[in-house]
Amino acid sequence: MEKTICNLCGGETFINVYKDIIDEVSNESFDIIECTQCHLLITTPTPSEKAIKNYYPNTYYHYTGKEKYLSTKIAHFIKEYQVSPPRKLLKRILSWILTKLLGRYVAIIIKGQGDNRRILDVGCGDGRRVSWLIQYGYDVYGNEINLDACRIAEANGIKVFNGTLEEANYPAEFFDIIVFSQVFEHLHDPQRTLQECYKILKRNGILIIDVPNIESLNHRIYSKYWFPLEVPRHLYHFSKETLEKYLERNNFKAIHWRYRYPKFYCSASIKRIYKFGSFFLLIKSLFGSLIILLFYFYPFIRSRDILFSPTIGVYAEKK
Ligand SMILES: [Zn+2]
């Protein structure tokens, strides 16, 4: 077996965090280890870049071309209506709702609109996450390894490349914004990808990364059954600390951190415990879910405390 070297710090010593996490797609088991130097969590054994395609079913939720969640449905409806609202005040209200639904970065993108601005969505799926920005004057690019998703993205007006970011070989200082939304944890070599981002981003260009938050209460309650561990499709598992180290090492400066609360992680995690865990764990996790639910209705903590957000997002500038 190939020796594991930490992608973030080059460390070679690890401790075991979880053993035998079952992947429901392949029915194979994977472990998660932690680098003793930088605390990056790594899925092991790591399927090769060629083999990983076998672990993505064509029905993978990012490729359906349809929206499952009400909040995303509302957001898409507003985005399309947003472009030509009859009144200025209405436009401002709609922007505010969009920001609440999709995060502050959306406001930043809308504010920075203008001609000839290029945005790249890495792992763009069906392209709907960014296609609406075309109407805001953006030149919208995406890359995606799944061919079916590429075809939908193309139909949605994205200049899409079928393959990895590195394979796309974009020119230097080409993009104003690069987005990784729930994609960064799927990369084989985040270090290499960030170097590529540094090359293809313009000076003061913006990098937006959104990943599951390993420090969250959500993860602590469901532990190895936590849905966003999603082995082996998620190759790395990040905390604010490890994500920040990645940015610093690649000459990016974190400007703003954001936290969100996608509820579906709870039900999906409980389902996994019901299927693979013990009765005791099920009771424990249901009790834990109640605590999460309580805090869900307490907005001050929900939106601000890193502990209560199952995802962690960062908005960083190229130095
Ligand atoms: Zn390390």
Image (tube, helix red, strand yellow):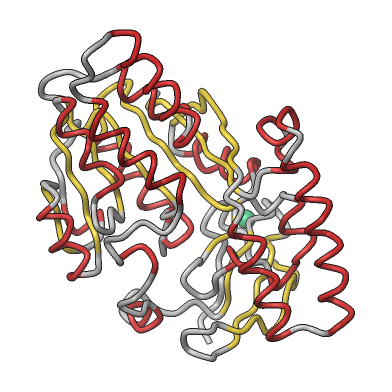
Name the foreground residue: 299 vs 260. 299
Q: Residue drawn 33% across and 15% down?
A: 90
Classify residue 48 as left or right of residue 134.
right
Residue 43, position as x, y percentages in the image: 57, 71
Q: Residue drawn 51% across and 58% down?
A: 7
Residue 166, position as x, y percentages in the image: 24, 55
Report the number of discs: 0
In the rendered image of this protein, does residue 132 appear above or below residue 278?
Answer: above
Q: Quadrant of the C terminus?
A: top left
Residue 150, position as x, y percentages in the image: 17, 62
Instruction: Give the residue furthest to the bottom.
Output: 27
Classify residue 267 as left or right of residue 126.
right
Ligand number 1: quarter of image: bottom right
Name the foreground residue: 49 vs 65. 65
In the rendered image of this protein, does residue 229 appear above or below residue 57?
Answer: above
Q: Residue drawn 81% across and 66% down?
A: 286
Classify residue 260 as left or right of residue 99.
right
The image quadrant of residue 165 is bottom left
Residue 189, position as x, y percentages in the image: 41, 59
In the rendered image of this protein, does residue 176 appear above or below residue 290?
Answer: above
The image quadrant of residue 33 is bottom right
Instruction: Give the residue furthest to the front.
Output: 86
The image quadrant of residue 274 is bottom right
Instruction: Give the residue furthest to the top.
Output: 88
In the rendered image of this protein, does residue 98 appear above or below residue 289?
Answer: above
Q: Residue drawn 30% across and 22% down?
A: 110
